[in-house]
Image (cartoon, rainbow, N blue to C red):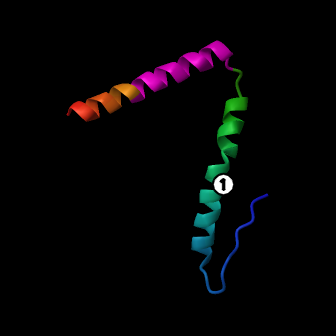
């Protein structure tokens, strides 16, 4: 359960922003979406390797350019 301390005189909009930010950091929605469909471990590993290679390629292009 998320607890958001709200100061006196603080607007509801600001409190909602704090709540949304904290909720995003917990990763609850990401976990739910991942559990909706089973993905084989080999496929997960392949995606991770591809993502790492992509990030590395971007980083090397940034250093060169």
Q: Magenta region: which residues?
A: 39-55
Q: Which residue is mark 1?
A: 23
Q: Residue at x 27, y 35 (%)?
A: 62
Residue 29 in which image quadrant = top right
Please tell me which residue lies in front, 12 or 1: 1
Please tell me which residue lies in front, 6 or 65: 65
Q: Is residue 36 left or right of residue 10?
A: right
Report x, y in % for residue 60: 30, 28
Report x, y in % for residue 1: 79, 57
> Is residue 47 placed above or below 1 in the rendered structure?
above
Q: Residue at x 27, y 29 (%)?
A: 61
> Is residue 65 placed above or below 29 in the rendered structure?
above
Q: Is residue 50 left or right of residue 56?
A: right
Report x, y in % for residue 54: 40, 25
Residue 54 sits inside the magenta stretch: yes
Residue 32 sits inside the magenta stretch: no
């Amino acid at each position: 359960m998320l607890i958001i301390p709200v100061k006196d005189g603080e607007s509801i909009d600001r409190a909602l922003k704090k709540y949304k930010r904290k909720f995003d950091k917990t990763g609850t929605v990401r976990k739910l979406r991942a559990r909706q469909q089973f993905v084989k471990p080999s496929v997960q590993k392949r995606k991770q390797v591809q993502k790492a290679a992509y990030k590395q390629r971007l980083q090397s292009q940034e250093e060169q350019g």
